[in-house]
Amino acid sequence: MPTSPGGWARPGPSRWRRSGAGPVRDGPPPEPVIHVAVDRHAAARPDAPALIEAGVRGPGAPVSYRVLVGAARAYAEQLSRRGVRPGQVVPLLLPRSPQLVAVELAVLMCGAAYANLDVRWPAERHAAIIEMIGPELVVTRDAAAPGGADALRLPPEDLSDVADRADGFVPATVDGSAPATVFFTSGTTGQPKGVVVPHRAVTRLFGPDRVPGFGPGRAMPQAAPPAWDMYGFEAWGPLTSGGCSVIVPEDHLMPGRLSELVRTAGVNRLWLTSSLVNLFVDEDPDCFRGLGAVLTGGERLSPKHIGAFLAAHPQIPLWNGYGPAENCMLTTAHRVGPADCELAGGVPVGRPVPGSDVLVLDENGQRCPAGAPGEICIAGTGLALGYLGQPELTAQKFPTVQVDGVPVRIYRTGDVGIVDESGVLHFRGRRDRQIKIAGHRIELGEVEVGARRLDGVRECVALPLAGDDGSVARLALLYTTDAADAAAGPVAAGNGPDPVGVRAALAARLPAYLVPDVVRMLDQFPVTANGKVDRAALESLARRPGRAARRPAR
């Protein structure tokens, strides 16, 4: 495999080394099977807290590793009696809870893979995904499963009582290549895509000298939607490394709730999308106090928010993580410092985490020189097995390519990035965010970078607006402001938060074809259930009549 900087994001110096599976840190490899890793911690420290349910009246009694594994074995016996076998996919229609974690482990003990379905999804989506899977069984709290599938109804119950029913179930023998879970992501056709993730893709990240922030004595909130890949980060990160996962029943973790969990449940590690970091910094920057590390990502970071975090909490390590669901949870990470907030291209996404390699390839599949943009492609043990029931799409997105004469299976992300001279990856945007208006090819990220440099602009998103014929006819920019500047109102010379001023400032700095047709200021951005910016909602807001700067009629 290549070791020169060009087009190859490499692990850093210090204790990193190379191996055939990709860059890893010194130290023993982790146990590759999820439930075996959890079981080993149950054997070593049976009474250590594995789960805490953070109820509205305060945290409940901890669920020990002994109880969690015992309950999982009892549920696995039930599942096995109902016909769950290795190689199957079992949909779970259960709310975020200790019971859900125990049932997930039970499915894995049967040698099957679980697919969490968000209980907030419409019934039609549940039925469509269950039809895609074609399962033998659906686990639910309802008497019947959507679409008429065979159902195992599990009412809420205390895991201690469930563990008492355990009767010596022997887990199926699987290895790290076996499917463990299926995440459903949006597809361009409107049909969700099922990303099939093996055990090793999860466990590669956690263990001695792996991703920072996990291990005995570490506690992390579990607040991500169960159907999202970062739910696995918040659940299996602690549980496969001997830590504690603190289950938050609410749909969203909020700043006041975080402070409460630090005080009452011992939370000392945190994952948040960058949009939620922005919200927390805006609403209550002190809410991070008491944490030992924060990991963020999912979207491009806001330098102003990150700078404010670092100024308020210089003692808390802040990591920027990058990675698509197709390379489970995390691909690269970067310890963020104040200087990163001044970089013109934004905060770097860093170096590969254990079990991942990153290539930046040109249109001919060749490695780009250092500093040259290309498509970010990922290799290593973190890769998904493919898309459920979609072999053609799997072959297209997970091809095997020749790298320095060696065949390497990769995932083509569709993201654009560069690798700098030191082997650090920088995210530059999406290939499919390149649009064409009036013959000009436009990279939306370039418009956003220009807007972020303006005084008073805090967050911004550039969006294409389609005309009646479906082609891209206009460009919109929506943004939020620094509170102090917003209170000052419109300012002269186009340097303030007023939409007219923002558009004028961009017109003074960018080619005419890059200047947005519509510029609108918002109090805050709408977010999806996953905590990411809701671009569909933003497009609707951009089309509304009202106060906005608009390109004069031509």
Image (spheres, grey):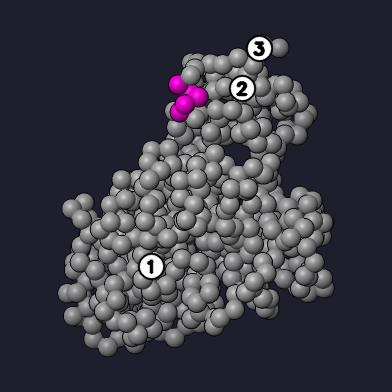
Residue 164 sits in quarter: bottom left
Q: Which of 264 and 373 is in front in this view?
A: 264
Q: Residue 218 carries which label?
A: 1
Q: What stretch is highlighted in magenta?
A: 483-487
For image coordinates 43% across by 42% down, the residue present is 281
Above or below residue 11? Residue 338 is above
Of the 4 image quadrants, the one containing the C terminus is top right
Between the C-alphas of marks 1 and 2, the distance is: 45 Å
Mark 3 nearby-residue class (10 Å; few <14, some 14–19, many ≥20): few
From the image, tell me which residue sits under label 2: 495
* Amino acid type indicated by mark 2: Asn
Residue tagged by mark 3?
A: 552
Instruction: Say whether residue 220 is magenta.
Output: no
Dividing the image into 4 quarters, which one contains the N terminus? bottom right
Residue 319 is labelled as none
Badge 2: how crowded within 10 Å, few (<14), some, or many (20+)?
A: many
Amino acid type at mark 1: Arg
